Image (spheres, rainbow, N blue to C red):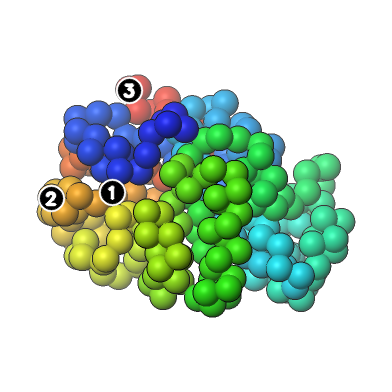
């Protein structure tokens, strides 16, 4: 997926085309997740889209971190929202619970935007995004880098998405769900937990009729690739882009 390709164009891709690969937190099976090294490797391995997670620091910086605390993926301890950006930057990133640490640090969203022009899927992990002032911080940062057209924001929580949509109507939003087998959320993008597309085999067909993009929540999709291809899934999530890309060629 080139930087020029919009999410609207993704929705119009024929079901016969190869699904695009979305690297879940980068090449998260190989390198510390949500680091610039993991994103660079994911692109080198064939990823078309980069997925990451957004949280605020105590001093309002937007950083790439999945968890509310830093223990799992860094050598530090404590809550993200209690730490300043300077404190976060002193931490070394690691693979979850691994003993070894490299030199990778927790990136900011601004660093990622400067690092790559690849399309991004930004998962909103912080309840602060429901606040219009905090939602505006994200919109203004994306606008600063000319990135509104190449980004989508996704979440398990619709109010967070609606706060962004109110400020940037053209910004695609995406709903992730663990339980709803119907593609009827008022969003352009849908991320159903993968068993839901088995529970409702018409899910992808129905979503396509509504002009929506489907990317199953399935970071290890290889066992189900043939089914996803048959349904016409547009985007595949993956923790290991190289493995998924190789499997798609089979």
Residue at (71% x, 50% y) in the render: 107
Q: Is residue 8 above or below residue 196?
A: above
Provide the residue designation for mark 1. Answer: 213
For marks 3 and 1 on the same chain, the one whose residue lies earlier in the sequence: 1
* Residue 202 placement, left or right of 55: left
Q: Residue at x 75, y 73 (%)?
A: 58
* Residue 38 in picture, x, y percent from top left: 64, 39
Mark seen at residue 10: none
Q: Horizontal and vertical percent for residue 87?
A: 85, 63
Residue 250's label in the rendered image is 3
Label 3: few (<14), some (14–19) or many (≥20) C-alpha neighbours in 10 Å: few
Of badges 3 and 2, the one in the foreground is 2
Residues 44 and 136: in front is 136
Q: Which residue is mark 2?
A: 209
The residue sitting at 45% across, 57% down in the picture is: 153
Q: Position of residue 191 (x, y in %)?
A: 34, 57
**Camera sees residue 180:** yes
Label 1 vs label 2: CA separation? 10 Å
Where disc 1 sits, the SS reads strand
Question: CA separation, marks 3 and 1?
Answer: 24 Å
């Amino acid at each position: 997926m080139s930087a020029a390709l919009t999410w609207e164009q993704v929705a119009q891709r024929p079901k016969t085309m190869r699904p695009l690969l979305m690297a879940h937190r980068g090449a998260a099976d190989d390198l510390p997740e949500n680091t610039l090294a993991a994103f660079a490797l994911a692109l080198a391995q064939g990823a078309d889209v980069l997925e990451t997670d957004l949280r605020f620091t105590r001093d309002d910086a937007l950083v790439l971190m999945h968890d509310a605390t830093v223990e799992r993926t860094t050598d530090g301890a404590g809550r993200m929202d209690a730490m300043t950006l300077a404190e976060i930057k002193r931490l070394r990133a690691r693979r979850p619970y691994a003993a070894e640490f490299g030199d990778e640090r927790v990136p900011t969203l601004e660093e990622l935007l400067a690092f790559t022009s690849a399309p991004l899927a930004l998962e909103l992990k912080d309840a602060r995004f429901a606040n219009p002032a905090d939602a505006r911080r994200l919109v203004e940062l994306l606008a600063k880098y000319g990135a509104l057209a190449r980004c989508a924001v996704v979440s398990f929580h619709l109010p967070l998405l609606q706060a962004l949509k109110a400020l940037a109507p053209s910004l695609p939003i995406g709903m992730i769900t663990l339980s709803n087998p119907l593609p009827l959320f008022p969003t352009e993008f849908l991320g159903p937990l993968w068993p839901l597309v088995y529970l409702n085999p018409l899910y992808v067909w129905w979503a396509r009729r509504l002009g929506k993009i489907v990317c199953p929540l399935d970071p290890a999709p290889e066992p189900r690739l043939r089914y996803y291809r048959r349904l016409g899934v547009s985007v595949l999530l993956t923790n290991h882009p190289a493995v998924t890309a190789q499997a798609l060629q089979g």
